[in-house]
Amino acid sequence: MLERELKNYPHPLPSREYILQVLGDQEGVPVSFERLCELLDVESHEHELFQRRLGAMARDAQLLQNRRNDWLIPDKAHLIRGRVQGHADGFGFLVPEEGGDDIFLAPKEMEKVLHGDKAIVRIIGADRRGRPEGKVIEVTERANTRVVGRVFQEHGVWFVVAENRRISQDLLVAPPQKGDRKALHPKDGQVVMVEIIEQPSRQSQPICRIVEVLGNYADPGMEIEIALRKHDLPFEFSAEAEAQTKKLPDAVRKSDWKDREDITKLPLVTIDSETARDFDDAVYCERQGKDGKGGFRLVVAIADVSSYVTAGSALDQDAYDRGNSVYFPRRVIPMLPEKLSNGLCSLNPQVERLCMVCDMAIAANGEIKRYRFYPAVMFSHARLTYTEVAAALYDLDPDTRRKLAPQLPTLEALDTLFHLLSKAREKRGAIDFDTLETRMVFDDQGKIQRIEPYARNDAHRLIEECMLAANVCASEFLAENEQDTLYRIHEGPTPERLVKLRDFLGTFGLQLTGGDKPTAKDYAKLMERIENRPDKALLQTVMLRSLRQAIYSPDNVGHFGLAYERYTHFTSPIRRYPDLLVHRSIKAVLAKKKYQPGEWSDIGLHCSMTERRADEATRDVENWLKCFYMQDKVGEEFVGSISSVVPFGIFVALDDVFVEGLVHVSELGRDYFQFDATHHAMLGERTGVRYRLSDRVKVQVMRVDMNNNKIDFRLLGEAPAKVVVAAKLAPTPEVAPAQAKKKVAVVKKTESSAVAPTKATAAKLAKEKLAKADAVKTTVAKVGKKEESRKSAAKVAPATPSKTTKVSKVAGSSTAKAATPKGVAPVAKTPAPRAALFQAPKTPRTAPIVPVVAVTAKAAAPKAKAASAKSSAAKGTGKTSPKKGASRKA
């Protein structure tokens, strides 16, 4: 081959084929770059080009480079590169970079790595289930340098149990050096942040040192502090960003007016929730021609964040790292410092603000005819709330209408336009799913009192349609001017999901039209067909889960759920980094320049990641709060609907308390249950009893695991269909201004960020639920006395066996007993009395689990309530910050 290449080229760079042949002769042994240059006769002046060729081959998965930068052929050594995904039970998987089946890693192999590490694995066979099994050859990248967890002491040895349960290894705490005055000395059971100073290997556990003591597990707001660190959420601004913020003005200056239009006389208003503090958008609408037959002028003014957060600045870097604001119950982690997010950039009432304007001309049929983007200076004439607008427009409340008299012409024009845009949405086939939003209500001490449904009104939808229109115009403007940007894309269902959905629908005699590539309109037509069916909730849930998640990407593929050919995010630059980039892109076009912040695809991946990260962190906090709320309800009985069916059981969402828990398959009854993935059901082989998604059931709370944020139920039987009454839906809360203590946090419960919820009247829901009641089956597998006795509360330990920790071995204790599994408190025959529920337990490594005691549910309640009272006494006052713009996230 060398002779052939010399014949064709006087000074050839080795071809890919030749490189693979030479490396193939090495029989899987890695070769250094220098040695490879010798083998291929690569001259020194050709090294840079040769290195690029090797890099390109690595990107194409033809070559593999290990941590020592040696080169080898992956197939030759049966090696696969990927990222490790740990499991709480000790085993794990390697998720290959190039796709394909995950590779099982036994607990012994997981001793070498931690969750998130990148590694090279050799396939050594298959496990008992037929999955490919691997052996860790080398760790190429460590993902964990800092970990948050709880510190415990056993036999004189201190160790940390990570809050991220995918990190199943205990982290040994290195003893402090003599004379180290900075060494931290936490108490047993406290929450700490540690730095890993020695990564795990086959010979040793990971070793760490404590860098921060966060406090006791029961401290007010500790669940948020843990979530911030567990999910690596930036929550402190850099010193450079703080210094840059201090230099910014407090108000719009005369010099800021340059090259901007003056729209301060235009009666723009903001419409937001009562607890909102950062106002991204303001709107104005007027009819054109007589009776609006000439259409409408819609002005959407958006905070001009890009004028203050310049590309490449410290503020810009911090905003990029965060990606978006994070809205926890009672606390917000903003993307920008408060001076900007709540002050200089926020479109507060009665002050001048810089803005970017999308000025639209919309025809009487709801079609956008023309639009124009321009920078301007605006003046918000009023700060309105959704509740006020709904009262004025839809309830026709006389007091509210008098109060909003100056704004009524704009509001009434907006309402008329809203109905036109809604019809246009239906015409193009956008998907609307009925979803439920809930809110958490707290007392003055910050203790959660209840969880209740949260009603969205047409005022929310009015603003939502205005924002959708502006976002579409932004995407069209950038596409027409060939300016790269980040689109908000939502692809249609995958072929695999489509097959599963159609198989499921076929069992109901239903069909999704559209062939191999159904459109949103096909989904919308099916939604119309099932509107009045008693099993609508079941069908809608399965349809929703067939869709993918919306992400950010420079490669536009349209937005499936909203039925748009192009779509982007322009309307929330205070709280979303992609919107800030879109503003910069629009300004570049207006200035007849090109904007290139870097690799758009990499930025899109990063912003999609930060969005998922925020969702996971808020979900963790909400789950913790729900567990805290339920921990004094052990033994109580509730009615709910099956929200998910998995191979190990069914999840049930309770009606009145709006929390979800698991009924393990062992608690379903005296039968052997098979998981039916196609029909989303559990089927009893002997009795034929079936539990299917959306079925109504009655359950008893068995235990609450605060350590793992899990609630376990016991199935008691079936239940009648639920009737939703309008009075049960609470309106948007009216609370004191932001400076006062707030008590309500809104929590949006969604299955996908791809689609927006739709209006469903209480009467329609009631009719639907009553119809479903007639269809509910009445047979249920009864639990016999023997089973009842076997499942008494004295036996609450999980099925997974206990294991002896390495800590005991390190301590050298010959009498060390098997350690308690993580997250499960040991239950003695005669339980010893406990102190407050969330104090550091005597038995290490566990937060308390509240079990059902052996006698009766009534006996359990006083003890749980007493513990809860002590725990809640430790809770302090916390501010409440609902999720900003939940109705605007499309």
Image: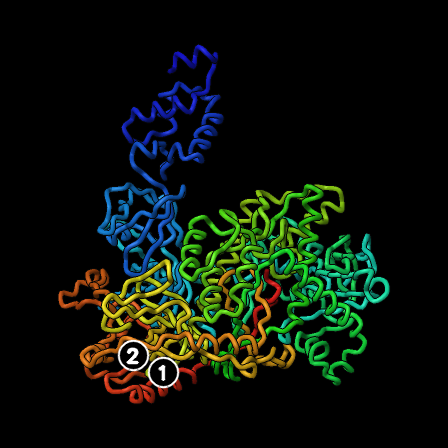
| Residue 838 visible in image | no
Q: Amino acid at mark 2?
A: Pro
Q: Position of residue 676 (x, y in %)?
A: 33, 60
Residue drawn at (53%, 50%) of the image: 514
On the picture, is 696 further left or further right than 513?
Answer: left
> Which quadrant is home to the N terminus?
top left
Near-viewer residue (812 or 254) = 254
Q: Position of residue 184 (x, y in %)?
A: 38, 67
Residue at mark 2: 851
Near-viewer residue (789 or 12) = 789
- Mark 1 nearby-residue class (10 Å; few <14, some 14–19, many ≥20): some
**How far, Cα to Cα, is label 1 from label 2?**
14 Å
Q: Position of residue 761 (x, y in %)?
A: 58, 75
Residue drawn at (76%, 81%) of the image: 401
> Which quadrant is home to the C terminus?
bottom right
- Compared to residue 22, the image places residue 854 above or below, namely below
Near-viewer residue (324 or 664) = 664
Q: Secondary structure at mark 2?
A: loop
Q: Position of residue 851 (x, y in %)?
A: 29, 79
Between marks 1 and 2 in the image, the one whose residue lies nearer the viewer = 1
- Compared to residue 552, the image places residue 262 above or below, namely below
Q: Which mark is residue 679?
A: none
On the picture, is 264 further left or further right than 219?
Answer: right
- How many circles with numbers are drawn on the protein? 2
Residue found at the far front of this picture: 509
Residue drawn at (55%, 78%) of the image: 744
Mark 1 vs 2, N-terminal side:
1
On the picture, is 807 further left or further right than 735?
Answer: left
The quarter of the picture where residue 273 lies is bottom right
Residue at mark 1: 637
The quarter of the picture where residue 860 lies is bottom left
